[in-house]
Amino acid sequence: MGEVKWTNEQLLAIKEKGENILVAAAAGSGKTAVLVERIINKIINEKIDIDKILVVTFTKSAASEMRARILDAIYENIEKNPEDMHLQKQITLLSKANICTIDSFCLDVVKNNFFEIGISPNLKIADNTEIEILKQETLEDLFEENYETGNEEFLELINTYTNYRGDENLQNLILEIYRFIQSMPFPEKWLEKKVEMFNLSDISFEKTTWGQILFSKVKEDLQDGILKLEEEIEKIKNEENINEIIDILSEDISQMKLAFEKDNWDDIYNGTHGIDFKPFTRSKKMSEDIKQEAKDKRDEVKKIVNKLKEKILVCRSEDAIKEIQDMYEILVKVKNLVLEFSNRFLQAKQDKNIMDFNDIEHYALNILYKYNGENYVSKKYQDKYEEILIDEYQDSNLVQEYILNAISRKNNIFMVGDVKQSIYKFRGARPELFLDKYEKYKEKDLKENDGLKIQLFKNFRSRKNVLDITNIIFNDIMSKELGDIDYTEEEYLNLGAEYPEGNKLEAELHIIDSKEEVYQKEDDDEEEDAEETERVEDIVLEAKFVANKIKELMDNETLICNKDKTYRKIMYKDIVVLLRSTKEIAPIYEQEISKLNLPVFCDMTARIS
């Protein structure tokens, strides 16, 4: 194997130590290779045994791959230094090294320290079916008991959340809250704290947590409307006979600016509700096209303002605060029922000597945080591990953050990830953990005491034309609001690989216009489901286009670059079609490709992870 040529940033990520390090590793930047090389560097140059390093991966398959790559690297170095006893020792130690998922590590903590929190040493991990059945039985028993005893708090919740069909709505609410709080380090305390946020005294609504968000949204939408109208005026100002339209648009802008400049809820409420869009001009002197265009833009802004009136600015501050205070009384009852269910469910699992994955993490957390001040269990792990390496850090949750911080020395955590690839918020992932360190940590020679940030933005996977179009699209659509980070030049994917001269192919982006209006629900504000079934007609159009594109590539005998950097003619097996989902869409693509007598294989089970 040839000697790897590491970039300066990669070498820094491989060798730097003595503080917490965050590596922002973009797609194709060789982060796994860097991780493996860092571990090998620890073994060979720093003489650290592999079982003194904790490597936390996101999946079991990633852990297996990491272990295999480390083993290959150790053997490769043994071939160079066959007399090195330290390297040979690592082969034996690798079998018991902690290269694992966070769940596996937590299970290890629990099994070795179960007596610290008074749980049975015989607890087994139950399968999902058994857990779900027990969860439902526990909830039904809890409801039945409350019905029988006539618990007043419970009956008030029944009246609030249920209908004549049954209490399913309330049951689902309890389960959803329970599931959500399990991603918090100390669920009961978190729930108590959040419910108390509704326990308000006299305060203006815009100063509350929710008021701040809504107040900012109102300001943002008003400013957006003002800018749209100002752009329209700038666009048409040099046209003839246009003064009447400009006067109307200017009056709209003035009204919206008066509302925008208000600094409390009631004033912005009154200002926005006071905006009056006068009838549009009917003058026949001006161009109909210009008038229609200006009217369309104005209608767009009117829709923005009307939505604010109908959906956000629905009441004054006093009424909003009163509703929150009323809600507090209900939420206290909901909280009590959730906590009672949580305690009963935990006891039911312990009675059966079983636990689920949430239990594993929380048991480990309770063990590591059992005592105030220094915890000797945490200290044991701190003494054991010279370094903690965390892969896919952008998908860590708060429970995992607490656990790994408890066993660290505060200067020996190495985190690798890319917030742009965070897709597990729905499972409790907290990409803001990554972003917080990304903002606080400093680059080499600029660092303070917070930690070191290393950026790996050279891409060794793709050609320049692919990277260029990716950067253009991401630059246009990705922001802190959409994607959690501003995609500026600092985030760009930069070319790292070298390719020989071949076909001068350009990356292509095709947008298919079906020339039909997109169906909208009656309620424009209702969110579309992320997995909404696409219209069959549109899928067929896309599939036809893809089939013809494949035929074009084959007919033109497009050249493909091999791994050894030589070129050959394209083959059918070089082409893959990636779909968001396969169940409904893949058969249509398969049919359209087959119509052109092209060989096609459809994998209905594969998923991109």
Image (cartoon, helix red, strand yellow):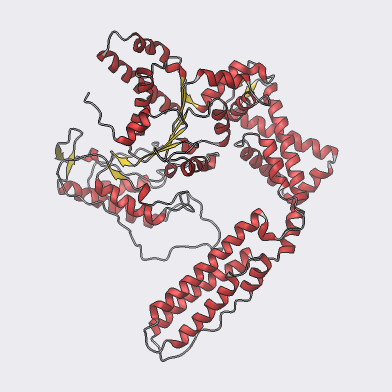
Q: Where is residue 519 in the image (x, y as percent from the top left)?
A: 46, 62
Residue at (25% x, 14% y) in the render: 80
Residue at (42% x, 25% y) in the render: 63
Residue at (55% x, 30% y) in the render: 405
Name the side, left or right, on which 204 lies relative to 228. Answer: right
Name the side, left or right, on which 90 lies relative to 301. Answer: left
Q: Where is residue 367 in the image (x, y as percent from the top left)?
A: 63, 23
Residue in front for this viewpoint, 252 or 77: 77
Q: Where is residue 200 in the image (x, y as percent from the top left)?
A: 75, 53
The quarter holding residue 50 reads top left
**Position above or below: 281 against 25:** below
The quarter holding residue 263 reads bottom right
**Position above or below: 498 against 228:** above
Total marks in image: 0
Residue at (80% x, 45% y) in the render: 155
Name the side, left or right, on which 206 lies relative to 73. Answer: right
The answer, for residue 70, to whether it is visible in the render is: yes
Rendered-image quadrant of the C terminus? top left
Residue in front for this viewpoint, 356 or 81: 81
Rendered-image quadrant of the N terminus? top left
The answer, for residue 120, to whether it is visible in the render is: no
**Position above or below: 585 against 14:** below
Residue in front for this viewpoint, 537 or 407: 407
Q: Position of residue 526 (x, y in %)?
A: 55, 58
